[in-house]
Image (cartoon, grey):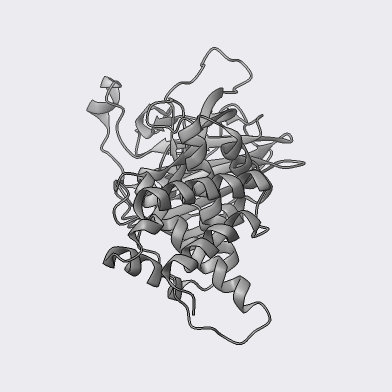
Amino acid sequence: MSDATDRINNVLAFIPTCGLLTKMEREGAHQLAVNFINAKYPPANSKQRTYEEFSNGMRLVSQDGKDRDHGRNMKRAAYLLDRALFWASNGAALGRLGILSVGQITDARITLENYLRKAANQTGNATASPLAAQEALMALYEHPLEFLRTNKMIVVGSPKWDLANQDYRNILTFYFGYVAKDDRFQFNWKPIDQGEGACMIPVDSIPTQYWSSIPNSWDAHIGHFAEIPAIELASQFMITTQFTGCAFCMKMHDQHMYCAHLVPKIDPEDHNAVTQCQPLSGKALAMRIARGPSGIHGDFANAPGDGHLSIYGAGFSDRVLIGGYPENLGGGGNYMTVIGVKRAPGYEIFSQITQNEAITSAQQIF
């Protein structure tokens, strides 16, 4: 049985040679691991209780099997990188990092890939290199559902909308990267609170619209949402801000994809709406878009007819097999993210639900 120092050194040596992700990402993760060990658990401290406890946290009973040593090393490496990322966050990621147990890891490869990617991005943040963020962005593009099932995502959306743009597009430059203190990847329209290693990417940005600002939306006797302004997608990625009760509308029209994000609240700047309408619940908004009092299904003003408008809302979706997202999301560690990826001949759109800081669902919604 290896002693505490041998175990740590063996795991450090395994990380850059494990064969997962790219060489650059493995080396970035290895650098973070080395920095962490040098700062917190150098060999000179090998007789200290905390040193022994850290190393013993990587102990696993040997099991029969062809790949038992490789699997054990992957679990140990994930454990070490989890602690390294918590250290790199200066302890800010409390409850999100620093708690992984090797005995609870069921899929060693996927878990280690997840931690290698995050650790490489953290090294990129420390060195102001966007290479790891670019690799993560490519992984999101090539395998969006797999990425969203294992990597928490949030979008810090922009309210900007170029209303003068007659082709109904809204392409903005966002920053993409990993933020250790929140243990999640994020698209952010501002560099504030984003890692130094974030990469810049043009995206289709879908701004929120208050339901009371939509033509006819405040009239309970009309209320058919048949004139929703939509954004036409044209970029590699589509993003929109977070959901805690909003409805997302999607439609293919004349071989082009259109989307809109509606908020079940009164527009504070629409004084006429304030005097004429009451706020809707998230579920009521989604259901009214689908089938208003007049029986008219919602539609886009700039892409009418020729295609069905799909609705994904809080507690309701007009696609029964998908269903809506939970109604009780309230921000903080509970939110829903929508991401779109361009595919020939159209777009694939995905949702990720996070509750109590953990991913509870990731699925394709269009």
> Residue 2, can we see it?
yes
160 left or right, relative to 21: left
Q: Is residue 321 visible?
A: no
Give the quadrant of residue 15.
bottom right
Where residue 317 sits: x, y (%)? 49, 54
Position in image of residue 215 (x %, y %): 43, 27
> Could you tell me which residue is drawn at 29 percent across and 46 percent down?
92
Most extreme residue toward the left is 275
- Is 341 on the left or on the right of 91, as rendered? right
Residue furthest out toward the right = 345
Point 58% across, 63% down: residue: 110
Residue 54 at x, y = what percent?
A: 36, 65
Residue 225 is situated, as x and y percent measured from the top left of the image, at 47, 36
Q: How many numbered tags mark residues here?
A: 0
Residue at figure coordinates x 56%, y 44% from the top left: 28
Choose between 364 and 324: the one closer to the eye. Answer: 364
Identity of the residue furthest to the top in this view: 164
**Camera-side residue of 366 and 88:** 88
Report the front residue among 353 and 212.
353
Q: Is residue 342 above or below residue 91?
A: above
Q: Give the vertical position of 47 relative to 284 (above or below).
A: below
The residue lying furthest to the front in this view is 44
Residue at the location (51% across, 55% down)? 115
